[in-house]
Image: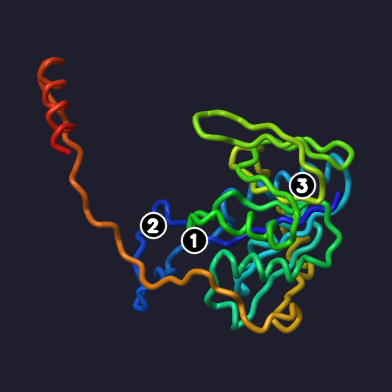
Amino acid sequence: MNIIVCIKRVPDTADAAVNIDSSGKDIVKDRLTFDINESDNYALEEAILLKEKLGGTVTIVSVGPPECEDTLRMGLAKGADTAIRITDERFTETDGFAIAEIIKSAIKDLDFDLVLTGCIATDDGASQVGPTLAELMDIPHATLVTKIDVNNGVVRVHKELEGGLTEVFDIKLPALFAIQTGINEPRYASLIAIRRAAAKEIKVLGAGELGIEEVSLKTKVESLFRPPVAKHAEILQGTPDEVSTKLAQILLSS
């Protein structure tokens, strides 16, 4: 089974101060650390597990600057076979649709059975690239996938729904799945594998090689701003009857 995995290099903002830059359209990234997007890491692990079980190859693809190669090499160290980085000056302003178009141009002629992406990016939270890419390539897709069972060109997919429910259905290959976190336990790369990956070639493609003259933007960032400070939580005190009365008054006045 030949699998393509789309991965994204994102800033780790969990414990860092995030400030808006002078343009008002992005954040200051100078002092932030970067790593593979969380759900993309699970997608990569799922691809490697499928390759180990069924054979085939894993190709990882990322759109971004040279710094993305560190993320791609870590993917190679974990078990991916080849890596592609897509970059061009014309790709500086993109949205989910444009990224999907760019990736489609890079992989449409590759031999693949399955495309895996993460279900959401931790930097923009858009969840658009996977489904958009599937629609552009005219292949079936499923999102929030928590389990994959492959049997003779058909995949039984477990999809997470609201309220703790799971939907199970069959999809014929080729297909695209957006992977939910928790589907597996991503591995760590060994030191030897990291050293070997450092010597591997990463294919770099630009707009010329992809035949793209201009990306198609459907959305545009006008400005970023911090959310307004809201009221703090109020702790209701007193007897159960007093607390329920106060709560009822708050609900009626809201």
Q: CA distance from mark 2 to mark 1?
A: 10 Å
Looking at the picture, does residue 188 appear above or below residue 157? below
Residue 81 quadrant: bottom right
Upstream in the sequence, badge 2 or badge 1? Answer: 1
Kindly indicate whether the residue at mark 1 contacts the one at mark 2 (C-beta within 8 angstroms). Answer: yes
Q: Three-letter amino acid code at disc 2?
A: Ala
Q: Which mark is residue 103?
A: none
Q: Three-letter amino acid code at disc 1?
A: Pro
Please state the horizontal and vertical placement of residue 124, each as a whole percent of the image.
Answer: 48, 59
Please state the horizontal and vertical placement of residue 119, each as a whole percent of the image.
Answer: 59, 49
Please state the horizontal and vertical placement of residue 187, each as a whole percent of the image.
Answer: 68, 44
The residue beneath circle 1 is 11
Q: Quadrant of the C terminus?
A: top left
Q: Three-letter amino acid code at disc 3?
A: Ile
Upstream in the sequence, badge 2 or badge 3? Answer: 2
User: Residue visible at 18% across and 32% down?
Assistant: 251
Choose mark 2 or mark 3, whichever is in front.
3
Residue 73 quadrant: bottom right
